[in-house]
Amino acid sequence: MKFYNRANELAELGKLYQQASESARMTVITGRRRVGKTMLALEFVKSHRSLYLFVSKKSEALLCAEFLEEIKKTFDVPVYGEIRHFRDVFALLIDVAKRERFTLIMDEFQEFYAINPAVYSEIQHLWDRNKSACRMNLICIGSVYSLMHRIFEESKEPLFGRADRILLLKPFSIRNVQAVLQDYRHDDLKTLFDCFALTGGLPKYLEILASNGALPYNEMLDFMLSEHSPFLNEGRNLLIEEFGKEYGTYFSILELIANGKTARTEIESVLEIHAGTYLARLEQDYGLISRRKPINTRPNARLVKYIINDNFLNFWFRFIFRNRSAVEAGNYAYIREVIDRDFATWSGLMLERFFHELFAESGDYNVIGSYWEKGNQNEIDLVAVNDLKKILTIAEIKLNKARINPEALKKKAEKLLVSYQGYEVRWLSLGLEDAGQYLSPLAAP
């Protein structure tokens, strides 16, 4: 699949590369696996001299030997004796950067924790001593979100404060997903929505589905639920390294949230544990969930719902992990029956998320959220506010738009309107067929 978008990130990397002509620059690219971090870095360095080093799980001595082979292919530098420590490899590259500007990409940078944690202190020492005298443009890529956060953003760590930029790479926007589908001759709203719901805009997932001719809904699910599908164990592969030995508890919490147990009390009731620490880590350390409160609620209000941020992981925990016995038995037809039975309910929630993102991309609103009252009463799917122009948009969203009752929506919003007196109120009934009018300004790739 060709490279799509990432214009802002490429521009930022370009600025840092230019600045590296005066003194060294360090950039961190992080984000969940499959989001395209390596592809972004490699696309950026197509136009200039660079060196790519992948930090694989092997001994430091073997890793250094591998790195030296790559260095010799790129630079004409003499290497004397045997180098067994990464600090010596990095010192060698620092010397090269004193003579010429180049970009060094270090992929899976967090793996040094398993190989030799002292590497981070050694890099810090060399960086601080030589930054102003060399012209290295260093890009550190990491997939384990919690470790990359720790390495660069915890004050007690040696590389804290050293990064000139930390780029958190996000999945493709709806506009980008649309551009991919257009290139594969799928222009309909249904396929766009299904791709958004099932992949969350992850470039790698889109590439896998597109290259296997599995983009419309039925073909997508047929492929995802086939015997050798890379999607069946994807959630486990992504998260076990993040969670470590407590992955079972974290997986159970995520399964409950994906299946509608979105309040802390509900989670604790089912699992019979105190879930506060786990929820806090899932939100703050791993970035996997978010707390949602009704729009315009008080900061200390207790009306909190947890959601899984990642669409694919939401799908995986709802339908695949929950039915892992059927997966292990190879009974994919059973899982497909469950999906066909429950997909309308699940995708209804995804349609709300779809419109929230479309409204956010419009740039017309400074606050976008949902609304509900105690006991999940008077739920409203979308509330968007423009405080400058004093415009309040209130929308009900359903796959079957005919089921929306505009008068019932106005009744549910009575208490909400008290907080927005003097605002122009716009009432909307939205179905998937209405997405086109919000997509039209975004149609160009």
Image (cartoon, rainbow, N blue to C red):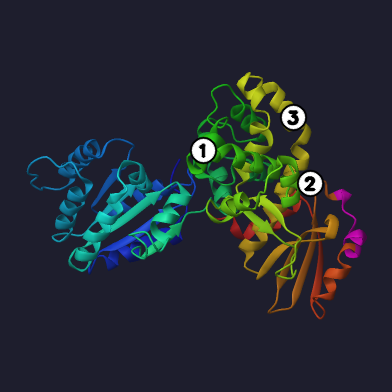
Callout 1 secondary element: helix
Report the mark closest to the observer, 3 or 2.
Answer: 3
Instruction: Assess disc 1: are there few (<14), some (14-19) or many (≥20) residues with their C-alpha within 10 Å of its C-alpha.
Output: few
Report the mark closest to the observer, 1 or 3.
Answer: 1
Answer left or right for 55 relative to 247: left
**Relative height, residue 425 to residue 142 (above, below):** below
Q: Earlier in the sequence, mark 1 or mark 2?
A: 1
Instruction: Assess disc 3: are there few (<14), some (14-19) or many (≥20) residues with their C-alpha within 10 Å of its C-alpha.
Output: some
**Relative height, residue 213 to residue 25 (above, below):** above
| Front-lying residue, 397 or 261 | 261
For badge 3, the amino acid type reads Val
Residue 359 visible in the shown view? yes
Callout 3 secondary element: helix
- Name the residue carrying label 3: 338
| Front-lying residue, 418 or 445 | 418
- Name the residue carrying label 2: 399
Answer left or right for 428 relative to 57: right
Report x, y in % for residue 298.
Answer: 74, 71
For badge 1, the amino acid type reads Lys
Report x, y in % for residue 321.
Answer: 64, 33
- Residues at marks 1 and 3, CA–CA distance in whole angstroms: 30 Å
Q: Residue at x 79, y 77 (%)?
A: 423
The answer to whether residue 407 is magenta is yes
| Front-lying residue, 96 or 110 | 110
Q: Residue at x 47, y 51 (%)?
A: 146
Report x, y in % for residue 204.
Answer: 49, 40
For badge 2, the amino acid type reads Leu
On residue 245, the disc is: 1
Which range is magenta? 402-411
- Residues at marks 1 and 2, CA–CA distance in whole angstroms: 40 Å
**Relative height, residue 411 to residue 217 (above, below):** below
Answer left or right for 125 relative to 26: left
